[in-house]
């Protein structure tokens, strides 16, 4: 990034911070703070091991320093400003989930358009929130658009704060369906002196697989026998014989499906349940970033600040806002709307921001400031002299 571009962005970030008042996380005085300044050259410098006391008045600090990126720790410490992690005195930490579009299955950052990446990441976020609400029943939850390629979820329930890295890894494995074992979804129950094996239908992965089993069985019933057998034999491990057994079991005892009884129909039904479990895991798992969740000392972006790689606002979201939230419209800073600037870029391109499609011509062009800031922050444009 050249000097003119860097100084322009730093100045406009400062103007943004003068126009807002940032909200701090709970226990802000117990957290470590860090930021990345607008360092000359191609490298970056992380300034960390700061306490809230070291920063002074937060709004003044941000207006004067206009950091490129700003962070606070998930952890709470006795002495957050101590120079080494060992001296800080770790108390506990929020449970943080990070979804980054770059790391999502099926997303190639080189070929996938930015709006499409963000839409895919939002779908993954909704799946994650299903786990947070239904499987874990967490209550103190904050959802944040990262300002870049994804979302952060902060969980601050008392029950999670003292979890160590191993316990947090178990949460990751559950949410990502790592080593999901069908046998682990099945209980052995006694009824009238007999035992049977049934899916756990009261919640969690067992309920998800059970729902898939019911839907699959209903779909088979709507087909003729030949089509139903063909559909079943497409699954790994189910041949003609097992397909016949499954269809017979479904016809003879439809209640067994509603109960989640995997004994009815013998090995064929159990194999079907295993195949459906694999499908459900692939469709419903949330591909969170493991190192972020397992790190009990993680620094995470401060909501309300600007992301130095996009110029967008790190935006906290109410749950009822999620459905309609469009980060390329709703995270555009108002401070950068309403004026135009001149930039230089190497190629023609189109930017979708603020509800507009901005076409940028190669060479020097005049564009809405929010589009120019976005391109310059991403390293795709430079600030041109204003005539």
Image (spheres, grey):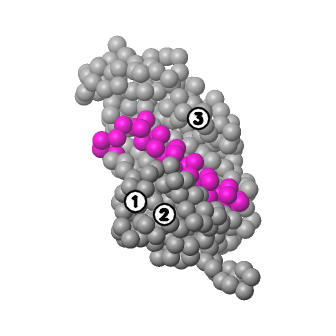
- Asked if residue 326 is among those painted magenta in the image, a careful observer would answer no
Task: Report helix, strand or loop for mark 2.
Answer: helix
Q: Is residue 53 left or right of residue 374?
A: right
Q: CA distance from mark 1 to mark 2?
A: 8 Å
- Residue 49 showing in the rendered view: no
Q: Position of residue 25 (x, y in %)?
A: 69, 51
Q: Residue furthest bottom?
A: 193
Say if mark 1 contacts mark 2, CB within 8 Å.
yes
Picture disc at residue 229: 1
Q: Position of residue 36 (x, y in %)?
A: 48, 49
Q: Position of residue 339 (x, y in %)?
A: 49, 16
Say if mark 1 contacts mark 3, CB within 8 Å.
no
Picture quarter with the N terminus = top left
Q: Earlier in the sequence, mark 1 or mark 3?
A: 1
Task: Report helix, strand or loop for mark 3.
Answer: loop
Tell me what residue is drawn at x 54 percent, y 33 percent.
Answer: 326
Q: Earlier in the sequence, mark 3 or mark 2?
A: 2
Picture disc at residue 290: none
Q: Position of residue 377 (x, y in %)?
A: 41, 36
Using the image as rendered, state which of residue 380 and residue 359 is in the foreground. 359
Tell me what residue is drawn at x 57 percent, y 66 percent.
Answer: 252
Q: Which residue is mark 3?
A: 325
Q: Which residue is mark 2?
A: 247
Q: Which residues are magenta?
A: 109-138
Task: Report helix, strand or loop for mark 1.
Answer: helix
Observer-side mark, 1 or 3, equals: 1
Q: Find residue 73 and report its image quarter.
A: bottom right
Q: Earlier in the sequence, mark 1 or mark 2?
A: 1
């Amino acid at each position: 990034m050249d000097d003119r571009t860097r100084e322009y962005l730093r100045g406009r970030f400062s103007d943004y911070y003068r126009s807002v008042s940032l909200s701090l996380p709970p226990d802000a005085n117990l957290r470590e703070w860090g930021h990345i300044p607008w360092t000359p050259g191609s490298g970056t410098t992380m300034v960390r091991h700061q306490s809230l006391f070291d920063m002074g008045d937060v709004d003044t600090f941000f207006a004067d320093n206009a950091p490129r990126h700003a962070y606070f720790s998930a952890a709470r410490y006795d002495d957050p400003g101590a120079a080494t992690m060992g001296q800080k005195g770790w108390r506990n930490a929020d449970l943080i989930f990070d979804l980054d579009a770059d790391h999502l299955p099926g997303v190639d950052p080189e070929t996938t358009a930015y709006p499409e990446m963000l839409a895919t990441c939002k779908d993954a976020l909704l799946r994650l929130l299903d786990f947070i609400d239904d499987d874990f029943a967490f209550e103190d939850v904050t959802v944040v658009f990262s300002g870049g390629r994804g979302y952060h979820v902060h969980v601050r329930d008392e029950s999670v704060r003292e979890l160590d890295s191993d316990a947090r890894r178990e949460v990751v494995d559950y949410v990502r369906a790592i080593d999901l074992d069908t046998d682990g979804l099945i209980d052995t129950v006694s009824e009238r002196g007999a035992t049977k094996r049934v899916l756990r239908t009261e919640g969690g992965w067992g309920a998800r697989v059970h729902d898939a089993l019911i839907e699959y069985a209903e779909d088979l019933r709507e087909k003729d026998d030949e089509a139903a057998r063909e559909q079943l034999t497409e699954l790994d491990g189910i041949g003609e014989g097992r397909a016949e057994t499954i269809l017979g079991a479904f016809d003879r005892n439809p209640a067994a499906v509603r109960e989640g009884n995997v004994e009815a129909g013998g090995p064929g039904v159990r194999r079907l349940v295993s195949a459906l479990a694999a499908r459900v895991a692939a469709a419903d798992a949330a591909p969170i970033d493991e190192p972020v969740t397992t790190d009990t000392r993680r620094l995470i972006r401060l909501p309300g600040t600007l992301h130095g790689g996009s110029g967008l606002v790190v935006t906290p979201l109410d749950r009822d806002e999620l459905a309609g939230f469009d980060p390329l419209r709703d995270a555009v800073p108002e401070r950068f709307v309403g004026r135009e600037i001149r930039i230089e870029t190497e190629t023609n391109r189109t930017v979708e921001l603020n509800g507009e499609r901005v076409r940028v011509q190669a060479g020097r062009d005049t564009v809405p400031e929010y589009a120019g800031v976005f391109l310059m922050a991403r390293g795709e444009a430079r600030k041109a002299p204003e005539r």
